[in-house]
Image (cartoon, rainbow, N blue to C red):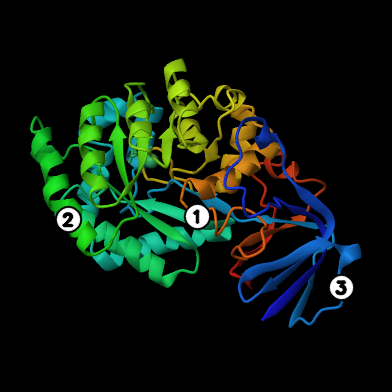
């Protein structure tokens, strides 16, 4: 099956296969072709170029994109979309003056979600999660990472990871699973954190490996959750199971999470709302992708990740949603891109690079998604008629998506 897209006002994010990520000043360059064509063959990007250079070719379908732009689908490298119910009450509690940390200390927060998830059936959890996945695909997301971490018992963590596995089987977009057993210390292990860490290492990890349920390992490395030495211990154990680290660090406090993560060759370090000069130095000596989650900062009214400090130091940066019931009940990457420009002073070029090619790197999917590159998946967004790609963040809150294509098929 071959589809020819013609008269594309601008074809955005065109890259050679060798470009796996963009860093520093490179992030301000977004390669495009104006008045372009694109050929999709058997679900993959087959060819593209200027309309003037379009040769006669056989195709099954032709789509006219006059006035519209095409860009690769968003790559959301950090989500928790498998969760049960919601935490709307905590949202109201915060409006009334409680902080996120205070709510967590009173047994709310992650433990509240875990309580709900533990009593939710596999089918119910799957259905709730599938609905969220369908919602974000319609919003232009064409690859997604999903974490466990609202189970916090052997059975409930396995239930979450099996739900992710079923989502992988039933949906056409690349999905990666991350084991985040070390998301919070369950109440049963209050003052017995070591016991819970041993449960993660001795029982959860072997079972997860046996069923091949995870691609990555994550730890919430933060005061009141897991320390740097806990993180070291868990990442060391996970290495024996071939799980690559993607770590929650520096959300509220800089306690050394970045240094330990880079030491373990983490694929990404995520959050970074607080970032020291020493953290920046650690990142300069690593291949680890820093990931910012601006919707979380927006929703919790906490500082935004200092994108300028990161990019101006020559580092790469990816953007993701963090979709979860507590700190970010939104999986809208369009909002993430707009907020990164408005609040983090990223240019539209930097934000689009961060939400596509650098997101793909942060999921180990550089060969499959994140750019318009021959041989990559034909996962792309056709915009409505817009004057320029800068309109995507500028006209925030408006739906500028005409259609989303996954493996060459309109969804
Ligand atoms: N900070 C850790 N985990 C999630 C939020 C968890 C929750 O509040 O449910 C995050 O990335 O923001
Ligand atoms: Zn998160």
Q: What residue lies at 67% left-to-right and 35% top-to-bottom?
A: 26
Mark toward the start of the polypeptide (3 vs 1): 3
**How far apart, in angstroms, are the residues tagged by discs 1 and 2?**
25 Å
Q: Quadrant of residue 91?
A: top left
395 shown above or below 83: above
Nearer to the camera, 86 or 217: 217
Nearer to the camera, 155 or 53: 53
Mark toward the start of the polypeptide (2 vs 3): 3
Q: What residue lies at 70% left-to-right and 50% top-to-bottom?
A: 13
Q: Is residue 326 visible?
A: no
Q: Is residue 172 visible?
A: yes
Identify the element where label 1 is drawn: loop
Q: Percent from the top left, x then y, of residue 153? A: 15, 50
Q: Quadrant of the C terminus?
A: bottom right
Query: Splitting the image into four quadrants, where does ligand 1 fall?
Result: top left
Left or right position of 36 against 255: right
Q: What residue lies at 65% left-to-right and 36% top-to-bottom?
A: 27
Nearer to the camera, 382 or 355: 355
For label 2, the residue is: 206
52 shown above or below 394: below
How many numbered dots are placed on residues in this image?
A: 3
66 shown above or below 58: above
Left or right position of 153 against 68: left
Q: Is mark 3 within 8 Å of ligand 2?
A: no
Mark toward the start of the polypeptide (1 vs 2): 2
Q: Quadrant of residue 161?
A: bottom left
For label 3, the residue is: 55
Left or right position of 67 against 221: right
197 shown above or below 102: below
**How far apart, in angstroms, are the residues tagged by discs 2 and 3?**
55 Å
For label 1, the residue is: 365
């Amino acid at each position: 099956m071959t589809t020819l897209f013609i008269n594309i006002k601008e074809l955005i994010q065109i890259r050679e296969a060798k470009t796996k990520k963009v860093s520093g000043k490179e992030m301000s360059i977004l390669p495009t072709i104006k008045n372009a064509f694109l050929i999709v063959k058997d679900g993959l990007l087959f060819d593209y170029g200027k309309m003037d250079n379009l040769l006669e070719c056989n195709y099954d379908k032709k789509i006219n994109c006059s006035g519209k732009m095409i860009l690769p689908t968003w790559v959301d490298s950090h989500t928790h979309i498998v969760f049960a119910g919601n935490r709307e009450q905590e949202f109201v509690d915060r409006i009334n003056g409680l902080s996120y940390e205070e709510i967590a200390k009173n047994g709310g927060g992650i433990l509240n979600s875990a309580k709900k998830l533990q009593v939710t059936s596999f089918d119910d959890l799957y259905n709730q999660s599938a609905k969220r996945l369908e919602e974000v695909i319609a919003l232009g997301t064409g690859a997604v990472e999903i974490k466990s971490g609202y189970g916090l018992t052997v059975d409930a963590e396995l239930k979450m990871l099996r739900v992710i596995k079923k989502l992988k089987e039933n949906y056409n977009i690349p999905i990666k699973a991350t084991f985040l057993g070390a998301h919070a210390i369950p109440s049963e292990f209050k003052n017995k954190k070591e016991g819970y860490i041993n449960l993660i290492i001795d029982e959860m990890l072997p079972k997860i490996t046996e069923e091949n349920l995870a691609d990555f390992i994550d730890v919430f490395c933060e005061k009141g959750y897991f320390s740097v030495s806990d993180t070291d211990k868990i990442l060391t154990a996970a290495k024996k199971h071939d799980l690559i680290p993607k770590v929650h660090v520096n959300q509220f406090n800089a306690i050394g999470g970045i240094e330990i993560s880079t030491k373990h060759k983490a694929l990404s370090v995520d959050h970074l709302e607080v970032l020291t000069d020493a953290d920046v130095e650690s990142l300069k000596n690593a291949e680890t992708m820093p990931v910012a989650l601006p919707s979380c900062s927006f929703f919790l009214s906490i500082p935004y990740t200092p994108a300028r400090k990161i990019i101006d130091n020559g580092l790469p940066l990816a953007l993701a949603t963090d979709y979860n019931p507590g700190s970010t009940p939104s999986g809208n990457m369009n909002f993430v891109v707009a907020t990164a420009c408005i609040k983090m002073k990223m240019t539209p070029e930097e934000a689009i690079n961060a939400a596509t090619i650098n997101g793909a790197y942060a999921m180990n999917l550089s060969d499959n998604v994140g750019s318009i590159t021959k041989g990559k998946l034909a996962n792309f967004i056709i915009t409505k008629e817009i004057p320029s790609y800068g309109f995507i963040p500028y006209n925030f809150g408006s739906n500028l998506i005409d259609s989303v294509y996954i493996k060459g098929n309109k969804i």
